[in-house]
Amino acid sequence: MPKNIILNSLKESFSLIWKNKSLFFLLIILQIIFLAAFFYVNLAYQVKILENVKSISDYLSQQKLDDVSVAASIQQQKNILGEDPLLISRNFNDIRKNFRLYLIYIFLLFTFFISISWAITGKLVYKINFVATAKNFLKNFIASLAYLGLIFLFFFSLLNIPLSGVAAESSKLLTKYIPFLIFSIVLVYFMFISISLMHNTRLKNIVQKTLMIGIKKAHYILAVYLVNIFLFFAALSIFYYFIEGNFFILLLSILLMVFSFVFGRIFMIKVVEKLD
């Protein structure tokens, strides 16, 4: 295996972009649409959840919860949480409902976008026809459902905790779910390897090849991730530095961020192709 796999793949990725400008531009547009939809869903449900949090906070701030007031309420057989203690549980249930809906929309958005964007990227890399691209889309969709389904099931499990459980075990929640978070990161690591293999690999062989490349040749895959992360954070740094400065440079930094996502997919496919 050649030692300059990463460098060769970088050169070939830029060459493919230059030779397939129309498809690359389509991927850029698709990435922008996805990011716009993603931020819209985030903003819409963030506002709803924050409204519920504010309702709980405002209600609790109106209550007298000092030792003297609590003791007086107990003696008078009054609820220490005021006249409408169920307001807290109602808003907590609304937070849980909105977060569930948010996860469902994000899951569907990511599953569809990953499937179609990687299928079109495969068309750019391999110069395949519409039928082959459609087959890759279906295979990507199956893989995305499997990987993202496991990740989102973990987040859904967080929502099965009752309000009393959150109050009693809030200090233990982070420690309890750290292994699941690590497991989710590992799934994402292997997911993009699997999707990069879809064009040249049957579904029944995907798991075996994914594990072989992801474990035995992890240094190459990690190098790909590091290059892509560097590109993204370089663009992000420029964005924050010029956020109140030069509008033209600010726009270029946003385009560079979008470029980093699209380029990252091409780069990953080229490296995995050489490792396969």
Image (cartoon, helix red, strand yellow):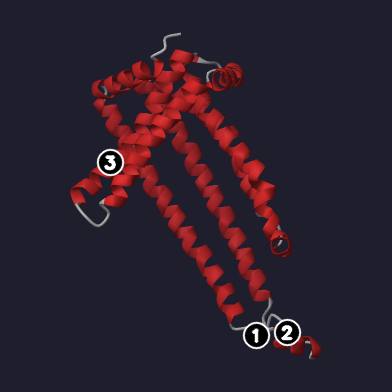
**Label ID, residue 161:** none
SS at mark 3 in the image: helix
Instruction: Judge left or right: residue 1 versus residue 190.
Output: left
Packing grade of label 2 (10 A; few <14, some 14-19, many >=20) is some
SS at mark 1 in the image: loop
Q: Position of residue 254 (x, y in %)?
A: 29, 44
Packing grade of label 3 (10 A; few <14, some 14-19, many >=20) is some
Mark 2, residue position: 70
Question: Disc 2, disc 1: CB below 8 Å?
Answer: yes
Look at 21% across and 46% down and name the residue there.
Answer: 249
Q: Is residue 76 above or below residue 121?
A: below
Mark 1, residue position: 64
**Label ID, residue 255:** 3
Q: Position of residue 185 (x, y in %)?
A: 56, 37
Look at 47% across and 21% down and name the residue there.
Answer: 220
Q: Position of residue 55 (x, y in %)?
A: 56, 74
Q: Viewer-proximal residue, 130 or 126? A: 126
Say what amino acid the circle numbered 3 marks: Leu
Which is more N-terminal, label 2 or label 3? 2
Q: Is residue 34 above or below residue 54?
A: above
Q: Is residue 224 above or below residue 104?
A: above
